[in-house]
Amino acid sequence: MRTLRRRACLIFSSSMVKAISVAFTTVAFILGVVTSVLSGYLGMKIATYANARTTLEARKGVGKAFFLLPFVLDGLLVLYIAINLFKIYYKTEREGLFEAITGYGLGGSSVALFGRVGGGIYTKAADVGADLVGKVERNIPEDDPRNPAVIADNVGDNVGDIAGMGSDLFGSFAESSCAALVVASISSFGTSHDFTAMCFPLLISSMGIVVCLITTLFATDFYEIKEVNQIEPALKRQLIISTALMTLGILLVCFLALPSSFTIYNLGSTPKVVKWWHLFFCVAVGLWAGLIIGYTTEYFTSNAYSPVQDVADSCRTGAATNIIFGLALGYKSVIIPIFAIAVAIYVSFALAVFYGIAVAALGMLSTIATGLAIDAYGPISDNAGGIAEMAGMSHHIRERTDALDAAGNTTAAIGKGFAIGSAALVSLALFGAYVSRASLTSVDVLSAKVFIGLIVGAMLPYWFSAMTMKSVGKAALSMVEEVRRQFNTIPGLMEGINNPDYATCVKISTDASIKEMIPPGALVMVTPLVVGILFGVETLAGLLAGALVSGVQIAISASNTGGAWDNAKKYIEAGASEHARNLGPKGSDAHKAAVIGDTVGDPLKDTSGPSLNILIKLMAVESLVFAPFFAAHGRLLFKIG
């Protein structure tokens, strides 16, 4: 009887511990959701104010309209508070504490996925509809108030590019922090209860906030933009300054917060003894890899360089050659970022195994405030131009906002490059944490169970991209038909006598984004659960690896192709060089070919491309959260066999 009672008590106690752990993970998930929503909401509120302010300041010159928008990382504060509150229950049990915290990253990424996909569908349906009918068919200016889709287009810029990117990078921060904390909890940090050293990932992000606030002063107070050709160099200067200052800040944090040496346990292999300066190099290599990705993205998407100018020149022979050149540019632009990511992975893994990769991801994200600011710069400048056009302001003001917008396209592409590069490192770090929680000692790609997961995982980004691209196409088709209907049926619309029905176009974008974002979201959320339950942790490990390798490449290519097409169009419209003037002016055959390329690239750069990095991160963090369940109850198909 005593033995039975003990067993019953142990079973009850174990069930209670699991239930409490689930409850804490759920609370962390809700906190992640709320923080992600709040980040997107605050971003849109600030951007809406900045849109009008930029338009007004552009009357005084391009320098007055040039400013950066720093975002405060409220997610860092919420995460730190959650850790300390959870610590009241878990006390010195660090592994359980940080496993519960992984729900925070899952919540943040869940919102980011729907924000990115839904926002991308919203804005690109309106953008494509407005451009194809207004600029190509009716030959009226961009953002002309006679075009029924312009309001939906401007609203969509805030929804997709501000709220979506804010939630995306917040999710990256939350997931990389959670991955680093989980790995640290099973290291000598956790066994010695060194809480300060375990919070090293949060200290990196804290230093990043300070550095980015200092960096902003160089754009707003120390240096004023006076000429159009100074815009992009000034934006690049922010990246260099923040990277250099952050390198020094990381060195200081590593020296003060870390013990001289500690041990990292590596998936059942021989423990790795790590020095404090090893982690400095891990963070630094991620930081500088991000800078390389940013500069490569700028080269392939800015109309100041030959790749985009070649794409613009190809418009002389029509839209087909424009599409061919743009796709080739996107494929080629993948090379250097992948090598940069590969070097960062090798160096950080060699120095501190998966913990090194996790902090390398945080290093790439440590300048997140500057990255968000220069990314938000694009849609804010775009909307400022729209406000100037719709308000009937001087064409000189529109020229200034167009110059800001062209630079903003490049900065937005740089922001997406940072998000995609960090997603690769974050996903790999989460993969390491998942393998650890699933009690796997190794992942053998020669195993049939792993390889089928690998090949299916590599297919998922293509399936996801097909769904999101078709969603934008369907919504854009409805938008084009509505805009054509209004031009044909509203008397005096082209003459400016009567106003268009903006509300109907806004409703089309809103309904399409809500309806069409569900299937891609379900694909991402359900796939790891199905694979883990039916096939087990080994097959799921292969799935995550395949999605990571495939998704990063497609995401970089899609984002850069779309950015290049957009700036090729603006290169022709601006007519700043003799070559550009020979291709123009607006309304010429070459310009119409460039507009078609831009509309094809819109869903690539603002919907499918940036959403893919959330796909690989969300699948990884979801697998991490459910890893113990899959390990205990998965492989149903193999058990039946």
Image (cartoon, rainbow, N blue to C red):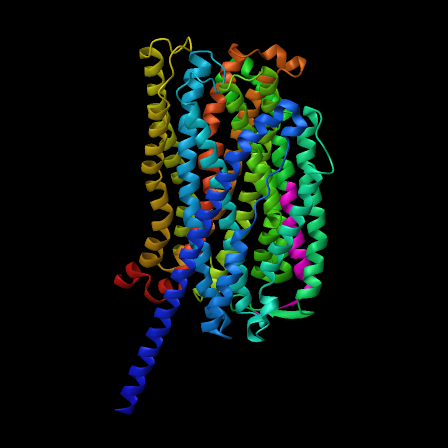
Q: In this view, does 439 lie to the left or right of 490?
A: right
Q: Residue at x 51, y 59 (%)?
A: 79
Q: Give the range drawn in magenta.
A: 270-292
Label tally = 0
Q: Where is residue 530 in the image (x, y as percent from the top left)?
A: 32, 53
Question: Where, quadrant-wise, is the C terminus in this rendering?
Answer: bottom left
Q: From the viewer's side, name the closer residue of 337 and 44.
A: 44
Residue 409, magenta (yes or no) = no
Q: Where is residue 176 in the image (x, y as percent from the top left)?
A: 53, 55
Examine the rendered structure and indicate whether residue 191 appears above or below residue 250: below
The single residue placed furthest to the bottom in the displayed view is 2
Residue 607 in sight: yes
Q: Residue at x 47, y 72 (%)?
A: 88
Q: From the viewer's side, name the closer residue of 555 and 47.
A: 47
Q: From the viewer's side, name the closer residue of 297 and 455.
A: 297
Examine the rendered structure and indicate whether residue 264 appears above or below residue 136: below
Q: Is residue 36 left or right of residue 527?
A: right
Image-quadrant location for residue 53: top right
Image-quadrant location for residue 253: bottom right
Q: Position of residue 64 (x, y in %)?
A: 66, 29
Question: Where, quadrant-wise, is the N terminus in this rendering?
Answer: bottom left
Q: Where is residue 490 in the image (x, y as percent from the top left)?
A: 33, 12
Residue 288, magenta (yes or no) = yes
Examine the rendered structure and indicate whether residue 304 appears above or below residue 202: above
Q: Is residue 400 left or right of residue 625?
A: right
Q: Which residue is drawn at 70% across and 52% down?
A: 247
Q: Residue at x 67, y 16 (%)?
A: 577
Residue 334 in sight: no
Dominant SS in magenta:
helix
